[in-house]
Image (cartoon, helix red, strand yellow):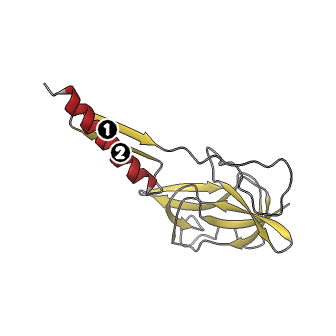
């Protein structure tokens, strides 16, 4: 039978190690089993400040649970909103090399429209717009590695 103090010390050391790794990466959750010890750590999204009225500085909007996060940014005299990657992976603008892109510059996008795919861990994840507008700029290149929260496209809101 294992000494409870030793098991507790090993568990604390493992938790500290996992927390350090979690802070140093884009990973949101880690779970590790070592012998009889099983530890799961997860990090929440950082709290977002919400301002009651319009501002002139770029402001972050609260992250969406089941979709991409939206970040405001100033673009010329119009406001452009960026659809950002909800996860890290390879971004694709079309469903296959022969197929047309989901969106092009000038395309009208409605909330819920697929704007691209991100391949992560051999799975293709549809990236959907949470806003309606016109595609102003496509930031991510086809086949490019994108990180979580990296802008993919910018929209001029309609």
Can residue 107 be seen here?
A: no
Q: Residue at x 54, y 66 (%)?
A: 91
Q: Which mark is residue 16?
A: 2
The residue depicted at 77 percent of the width and 56 percent of the height is: 110
Number of numbered discs on residues: 2
Name the quadrant containing residue 108.
bottom right
Circles 2 and 1, Cβ within 8 Å, touching? The answer is yes
Q: Which disc number belongs to residue 12?
A: 1
Residue 92: x and y in percent read 55, 67
Q: Nearer the viewer, residue 97 or 63?
A: 63
Element type where label 1 sits in the image? helix
Q: Quadrant of residue 126?
A: bottom right
Identify the mark at residue 57; answer none if there is no mark. none
Q: Position of residue 31 (x, y in %)?
A: 36, 42
Find numbered disc 2 in the image and state the secondary structure of the residue it sits on. helix
- Does residue 69 appear left or right of residue 76 in this picture? left
Q: Is residue 53 left or right of residue 149?
A: right
Outermost residue on the left side: it is: 1
Along the line of sight, which residue is nearer the eye, 95 or 114?
114
Residue 75 lies left or right of residue 46; in this view the side is: right
Q: Quadrant of the N terminus?
A: top left
**Residue 25 in view here:** yes
Q: Is residue 77 left or right of residue 58?
A: right
Q: Quadrant of the C terminus?
A: bottom right
- Residue 123 in percent (x, y) is at 46, 55
Near-viewer residue (34 or 95): 34
Q: CA distance from mark 2 to mark 1?
A: 6 Å
Residue 60 is situated, as x and y percent measured from the top left of the image, at 71, 55
């Amino acid at each position: 039978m294992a000494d409870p103090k030793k098991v507790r010390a090993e568990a604390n050391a493992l938790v500290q190690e996992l927390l350090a790794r979690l802070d140093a990466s884009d990973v949101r959750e880690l779970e590790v089993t070592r012998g009889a010890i099983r530890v799961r750590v997860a990090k929440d999204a950082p709290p977002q400040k919400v301002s009651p009225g319009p501002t002139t500085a770029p402001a972050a909007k609260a992250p969406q649970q089941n979709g991409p996060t939206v970040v405001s940014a100033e673009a010329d005299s119009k406001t452009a909103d960026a659809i950002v990657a909800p996860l890290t992976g390879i971004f694709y603008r079309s469903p296959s090399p022969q197929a047309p892109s989901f969106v092009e510059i000038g395309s009208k996008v409605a909330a819920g429209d697929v704007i691209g795919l991100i391949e992560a861990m051999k799975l293709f994840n549809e990236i959907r717009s949470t806003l309606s507008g016109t595609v102003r700029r496509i930031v991510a290149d086809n086949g490019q590695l994108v990180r979580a929260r990296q802008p993919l496209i910018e929209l001029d809101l309609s």
